[in-house]
Image (spheres, rainbow, N blue to C red):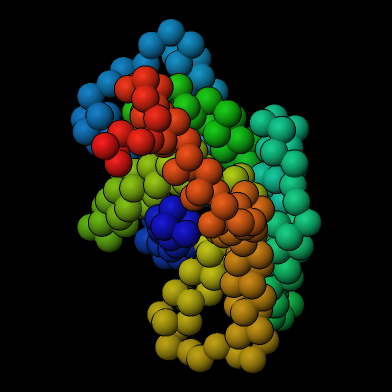
């Protein structure tokens, strides 16, 4: 449960980026937005870990950085400009199921019944929370958001597969730097000069870079290393929950009954996917059925050990 709570920091932080991007960051510069978000965050973590890639981690960092950061940041930035936050968040809510299926194919983590049920319940809850009325759908925006969901899910599974090889802080920093460097040349060619930033945009980028990127991805990959992919994916549903609650606070509105029911379904879906219940059941299955007898056997084993050491029987205690 401790690592579940730590991992939850990431989707909560990411849930704020839609609002920040839509309200404060310049439009029409998704590639520069991705580069400005990834590169400073990667350099910050690199300064903390002071490790550079070795061997295969040069190309692994490039692959993971492109999937998890470079292309993902650009696609999310663009989706936030083309779609209402509610629609973009709803599409991304399918990522737990995508993560489960990809984890099954890549790291042989077969999805179990409860996490799959939790994923379905969670997606239904997100739909209840966000799809509260008629909204305009931009086809490019929908495709962009769906592509971001699939590519990031694949990147997360690959990161989980390779996670035991290096320190999580180091691998996160390499991914961020690689992702930023991949996107930057495309930004120069496609978008020309960097966007001019006012004070609000600078502060917004500072928040997105440090909190919603450096800190969030470090704890996310740490959670992926220690928890099943299904559990981590369902924790990601806190992303749209945060977006709804933030919008409610900013707009000073109260949650409707429909949104409240949706929130309850999302939380239920997250709980169903956590490994606490299965771990407790495993401990019960491995617990000895006759503790008294087990202790007696252990005591006998201990006396036998003493006999082997002294070459005498337990009568030594009586002598």
Report the residue that reaches farthest toward the top: 55
x, y percent for residue 189: 48, 26
The C terminus lies in quadrant: top left
Judge left or right: residue 91 versus residue 189: right
Q: Residue at x 60, y 77 (%)?
A: 263
Q: Classify 123 as above or below 96.
A: below
99 and 27: which is toward the camera: 99
Residue at 30% x, 34% y is 316
Position of residue 179 measured from the top left corner of the image (x, y, whole percent): 45, 29
Look at the image and tell me whether residue 116 can be seen: yes
Residue 67 shows in the view: no
Q: Is residue 175 left or right of residue 40?
A: right
Judge by depth and name the residue closer to the eye, 73 or 175: 175
Pick the front one: 91 or 225: 225
Residue at the location (38% across, 42% down)?
218
Q: Residue at x 40, y 30 (%)?
A: 313
Residue 183 vertical position relative to residue 246 in the rendered view, above or below: above
- Image quadrant where residue 106 sits: top right
Query: Where is residue 202 drawn, in percent x and y?
Result: 26, 52
Residue 107 image position (x, y, % from top left): 67, 31
Quadrant of residue 89 within the rendered picture = bottom right
Q: Is residue 143 above or below residue 289?
A: above
Q: Which residue is outermost to the front?
A: 319
Image mark count:
0
Q: Closer to the camera, 296 or 252?
A: 296
């Amino acid at each position: 449960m401790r690592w579940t709570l730590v991992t939850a920091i990431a989707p909560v932080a990411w849930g704020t980026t839609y609002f920040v991007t839509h309200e404060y960051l310049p439009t029409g510069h998704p590639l520069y937005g991705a580069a400005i978000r990834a590169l400073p965050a990667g350099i910050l973590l690199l300064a903390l870990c002071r490790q550079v890639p070795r061997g295969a981690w040069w190309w692994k960092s490039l692959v993971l950085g492109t999937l998890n950061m470079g292309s993902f940041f650009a696609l999310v930035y663009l989706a936030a400009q083309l779609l209402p936050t509610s629609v973009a968040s709803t599409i991304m809510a399918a990522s737990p199921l995508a993560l489960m299926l990809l984890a099954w194919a890549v790291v042989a983590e077969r999805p179990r019944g409860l996490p799959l049920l939790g994923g379905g319940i969670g997606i239904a809850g997100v739909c209840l929370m966000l799809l509260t009325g008629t909204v305009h759908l931009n086809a490019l925006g929908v495709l962009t958001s769906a592509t971001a969901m699939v590519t990031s899910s694949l990147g997360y599974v690959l990161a989980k597969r390779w996670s035991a090889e290096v320190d999580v802080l180091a691998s996160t920093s390499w991914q961020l730097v690689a992702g930023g460097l991949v996107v930057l040349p495309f930004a120069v060619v496609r978008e020309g000069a960097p966007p001019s930033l006012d004070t609000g945009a600078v502060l917004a980028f500072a928040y997105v870079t440090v909190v919603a990127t450096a800190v969030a991805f470090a704890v996310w990959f740490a959670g992926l290393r220690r928890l099943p992919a299904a559990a981590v994916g369902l924790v990601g549903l806190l992303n749209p929950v945060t977006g709804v609650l933030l919008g409610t606070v900013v707009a000073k509105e109260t949650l409707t009954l429909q949104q409240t029911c949706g929130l309850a379904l999302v939380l239920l879906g997250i709980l169903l996917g956590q490994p606490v219940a299965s771990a407790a059941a495993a401990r019960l299955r491995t617990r000895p059925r006759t503790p008294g007898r087990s202790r007696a056997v252990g005591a006998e084993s201990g006396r036998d050990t003493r006999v082997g050491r002294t070459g005498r029987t337990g009568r030594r205690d009586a002598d």
